[in-house]
Image: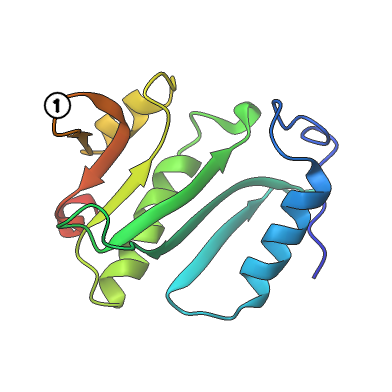
Amino acid sequence: MMIKPSRESRGSTGGGPPVSLRENQWQRILGANDATDFTFVVEDDSHRLVAFARGRRHDGGVPGYQGELNKIYVLRRVHRHGIGRALVRLVADRFLSQGVTSMLLFGDARNPSNGFYEHLGAVRLLSPEGEFNGGYGWPNLRELV
């Protein structure tokens, strides 16, 4: 399977890794066929990728959380259409079907999307010093779905 970025997102890695590296990473992830590591993809009517969300088991680094919303991305042109909310709930529902009842995500504390997570009931995860570094958690996924 070849993952190709849409024309809208090609090359716009924001100073991050090159598209070729991301393609290789996603080919490995999607080709692994691991039920505990899953990805939902949303295409528009022209079959172009507009959004995705990836869930996987949490490594235990933050006690009390079993699942991780590892990646979520929605193209700006389809923001406020309910796609992000549907993806988060799909990930939560998949986790619940696997017996995973809590989920977290690690993001950027300055990300404008943080309000979205809070609107969906996520709680801020604070460091031992009480600082917010961009982590959010849903301690009870049943409340989300």
Asked whether the viewer can see residue 86, the reply is: yes
User: Is residue 15 placed above or below 58 in the rendered structure?
Assistant: above
Viewer-closest of 28 and 45: 28
Local crowd size for mark 1, using a 10 Å CA cut-off: few (<14), some (14–19), many (≥20): few
| Rendering colour mode | rainbow
Name which residue lies at 32% across and 68% down: 95
- Judged left or right of residue 116, residue 63 is left
Which residue corresponds to mark 1?
Answer: 129
Q: Position of residue 57 (x, y in %)?
A: 36, 67
The number of numbered badges drawn on the structure is 1
Going 48% across and 29% down the picture, which residue do you hit?
80
Q: In screen coordinates, is 95 left or right of 82?
A: left
For badge 1, the amino acid type reads Glu
Measuring from the top left, give residue 8's x and y in whole percent. Answer: 80, 32
Residue 5 in view (yes/no) = no
Secondary structure state at the residue bearing disc 1: loop
User: Which residue is depicted at the point 35% across and 45% down?
Assistant: 105
Q: Nearer the viewer, residue 144 or 2?
A: 2
Q: Is residue 109 above or below residue 144?
A: above
Q: Residue at x 36, y 69 (%)?
A: 94
Residue 75 lies in quadrant: top right
Considering depth in this image, is 71 or 52 the residue closer to the camera?
71
Looking at the rendered image, the quarter that the N terminus falls into is bottom right
**Does residue 135 appear left or right of residue 37 in this picture?**
left
Give how far across and how far down residue 96 sits, in percent.
Answer: 26, 70
